[in-house]
Image (cartoon, rainbow, N blue to C red):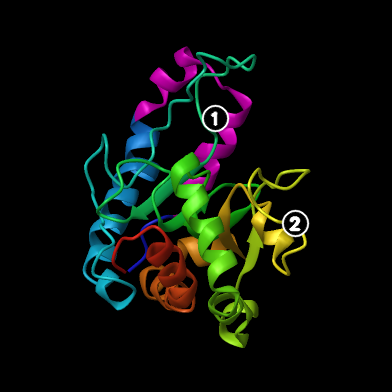
Amino acid sequence: MAYFTRETFRFLNDLAEHNDRAWFDENRDRYEAHVKEPAQRFILAMGAGLDRVSPHLRADPRPVGGSLFRIYRDIRFSKDKRPFKTHTGIQFRHHRGRDAHAPGVYLHIDPRSCFLGLGVWRPPGPALKKIRTALVEDPEAWRDATGSPEFAETFELGGESLSRGPRGFDMSHPLAVDLKRKDFVATRPVPQSFVTGADVVEDTLALAERGVPFMTFLCRALEVPF
C-alpha cells in the first residue's frame, strides 16, 4: 500500500517557495491530505512490524508529541524566521525517550533529499559521555556494530563532530575519530520512489533491521534495553 505520493513532494516544494502563514492557511487542506494524514497512516502501519527491529521502539500516530514531527519551525532563537519546515520527519523512538534526542529510527521526506536514519541525534551531555565511555571500554563491540558488511554496505555514519577531543578522553585512543562525534547516527539516502512506493513499510523495516547491532550498542551504552 502506498502512503505518500507525488503530491506530498509537490506540496513541500510549494511550501519552500511560499513559506509564510497566509499561504499555509490557504493550503492547509493540502498539507492534511498529502502530508499529515498519510504520515499518520504510515506510522500506524509501521507499528505492526517494529518488533522486527526492537520491541522497545514506538510508533505513535498522535498529531502532537507522537512520531510525526511538527511542521512548524522553532524560530525563537533563529535569525531565519521562516515559520515552516519544508520537509517531513518521522521518528520511531525508544519508549524511554521523550524527544528527538532518543535512540530511534527516522525517515526524512524532503524534495531535495530523502533518507533513513538510525541512532542518537545530539544526545545531551550525560548520554553522550556514556556512549563515549562505551567506545573506550569496548572498542571491538563498536567495530563489530559498524564494520559488518551488512551495516557498512547499507549505512554511513554521519552527524557533527568536535574539532578537538572531548574533555576527559584520551585522543590517542584508536577510536579517537568516533570519540569526537556529537551525533551517533547512521544514514541511508533513499529516492523519492522509496517513499512513494507500495512497499515503503516493508522496505523501511528491512533497512532498519540491518542496523540492529548499531542500535543495540548505543542502547547498551545508554543502559536501556533494545
Secondary element at image label 2: loop
The answer to whether residue 102 is visible is: yes
Residue at numbered disc 1 = 15
Amino acid bearing label 1 = Leu
Precedes in sequence: disc 1 or disc 2? 1
Tell me what residue is drawn at x 52 percent, y 67 percent: 194
Q: Is residue 159 above or below residue 54?
A: above
- Report the span colored magenta: 5-28
Q: Position of residue 105 (x, y in %)?
A: 42, 60
The reply to whether callout 1 and callout 2 are in contact (CB within 8 Å) is: no
**What's the distance in space between the residues labelled 1 and 2, CA to CA?**
45 Å
Amino acid bearing label 2 = Met
Relative depth, front residue between 6 and 108: 108
Residue farthest along the bottom direction in this orientation: 149
The answer to whether residue 6 is visible is: no
Q: Which label belongs to residue 129?
A: none
Magenta includes 12? yes
Tell me what residue is drawn at x 23 percent, y 48 percent: 61
Q: Tell me: 58 left or right of 166.
A: left
Picture quarter with the C terminus: bottom left
Magenta-drawn stretch, dominant element (helix, strand or loop): helix
Q: Which label belongs to residue 171?
A: 2
